[in-house]
Amino acid sequence: MKRFFPWLILIALTVLTGLTLLLTIEGLTKSISYSSEITLPEKKTVSVVLVGDTMLNRGVEYMIKNEGDGDFRFPFLKIAEDLKGVNLLFGNLEGPISDKGIKVGSIYSFRNDPKTIEGLTFAGFDVISLANNHVFDYGREALEDTFLRLKTAGIDYVGAGFNEGEAYGESTPVIKEIEGTKIGFLAYTNLGPETWKAVGENSGMAWISEEDIDYNPPTTSSHSSLRSEWAPRIKNDIKAVKEKVDILIVSFHSGEEYLSTPTQFQIEFSKAAIEAGADIVIGHHPHVIQKSEQYQSGYIFYSLGNFVFDQSFSEETQQGQMVKILIKNGKIKEVIPEKIEINNYFQPEIATEEEQ
C-alpha cells in the first residue's frame, strides 16, 4: 500500500491541475462575445463618369496643331485632374478615327486624325459610343478602320460594329467588371439613313426609327413601348444584357440640334429603356444641355451637351454636363451632375461653384 501511495497523490494532483485549467479557460471564454451572423466585407465604391459629344476634327484639330504643338492630349489638359481615379469613362465620339475613306457626308463632315487615340487614352476613356450621325461621314472603310484602331488601343465601343450582333450588343455586349461590379453599355441612334444600320454580317450602327415608337397622348400616365419587329428586339436586348450586369447604361443619340427640350421620341425611347431594365439613359446630339429626371428606379439625362467641340457661336454650345455615378454593392449610391465650360481653345473644365 505504501508503494502505491505516492502514485495516488500524483494522480490526484494531475486531476486537480486539469480541473483548475478548465475552469480558467471557461472564465476567459465567457468574456468573449460571438456574433451569430457572418459579416461579408463591403465592395468598394465604383465611379463611372458620363460625358457628352466629343469631336477632335475641324476647329478642335486647328487648336491642337496651333496652340497645343500637335499634341492630341491638348483638349483634355484642363479636365484631366478631375478624371483621375475614375473607374470608367464613357462618352460619344462624333466621326470616325481614320485616315481612310472618301467623304460621303455633308459639308459638316468629321474624320478624326488617328492621333485622336492618344487624346482619348490620356483622358481615360474606357468605352465610346459610335451610334451617331457622323460615324459614316467617310464611308464604311473609315468606320471599320475606327473599330480596329479602338480595339488596338484597348477602348471598347458600342452602338456600331462589324456585324449586326456586335452593333446591337447581342453577340458581344460590352460589360466592364470593376471591384466585382458588372456594368454594361448599349447605344442606339435614329439619325442618318436606314442604310447605315448593321444588318447580318454587314457593318453599321445600332439604328432605330421613329416609326418603331408608339406615341401616347400627353394625358395618359402610361408610356409606350417599342413596337413592330423592333419592339421585342430592343427591349429584349436591354433585358438580356441587364440579366448579366448589376448596372446598365444606355446611350441614345437623338433629338434636335440646339433645342433645349427633348423631343417626344427621346422621351418615349428613354422611358421604354428604363422599363426594360436600363438604370441610366443618357442622350447626345442636341449639343446643348437638356433636362434630366428620375423615372421609376432609373435616371434619364436627355442631353449632356458638348464635351469637346468647336461650336463657339453660342454660350449654350460651350457648356456641357458631366455625370458622375457612384455604385456600391451593385447599386447606384449617388448620381452627381456637374456643369462644364468649354474655353476658347475648346478645352472642357469644371465650372466654378457660381456657374454650377
Image (cartoon, rainbow, N blue to C red):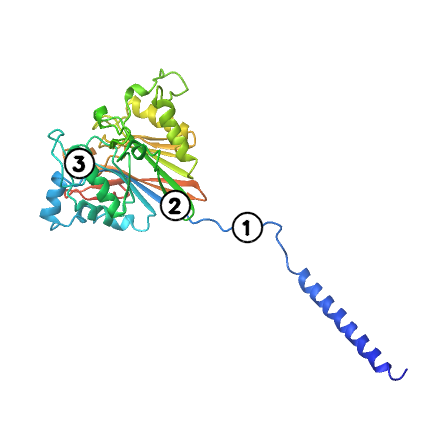
Q: Which residue is mark 1?
A: 39
Q: Picture coordinates of residue 20 (x, y %)?
A: 75, 70
Please name the amino acid that badge 1 sits on: Thr
Can the viewer see residue 308 in this picture?
no
Q: CA distance from mark 3 to mark 2?
A: 32 Å
Position above or below: 220 against 319: above
Query: Regarding mark 1 in the picture, which secondary structure is present there?
Result: loop
x and y percentages locating residue 101 in the rendered image = 13, 36
The residue closer to the viewer here, 208 or 247, is 208
Decide: is 61 above or below 134: below
As drawn, the label of residue 177 is 2
Quadrant location of the N terminus in the rendered image: bottom right
Residue found at the far bottom of this picture: 2
Residue 233 shows in the view: yes
- The C terminus: image quadrant: top left
Q: Which residue is mark 3?
A: 141
Q: What residue type is disc 2 on?
A: Glu
Distance, label 1 to label 2, CA atoms, is 23 Å
Closer to us: mark 3 or mark 2? 3
- 3 vs 1, front mark: 3
Which residue is rendered at x = 21% and y = 37% of the image? Answer: 144
Instruction: Choose top left, top right, bottom left or bottom right for residue 14.
Output: bottom right
Dot 3 amino acid type: Glu
Image coordinates of residue 304 in percent, x first then y, are 27, 35
Q: Which mark sits nearer the N-terminus, 3 or 1?
A: 1
Q: Are marks 3 and 1 in contact (CB under 8 Å)?
A: no
Of 320 and 25, the residue lying toward us: 25
Could you tell me which residue is drawn at 37 percent across and 30 percent down? 237
SS for tag 3?
helix
- 10 Å neighbourhood of mark 2: few (<14), some, or many (≥20)? some
**In this image, 238 relative to 6: left or right?**
left
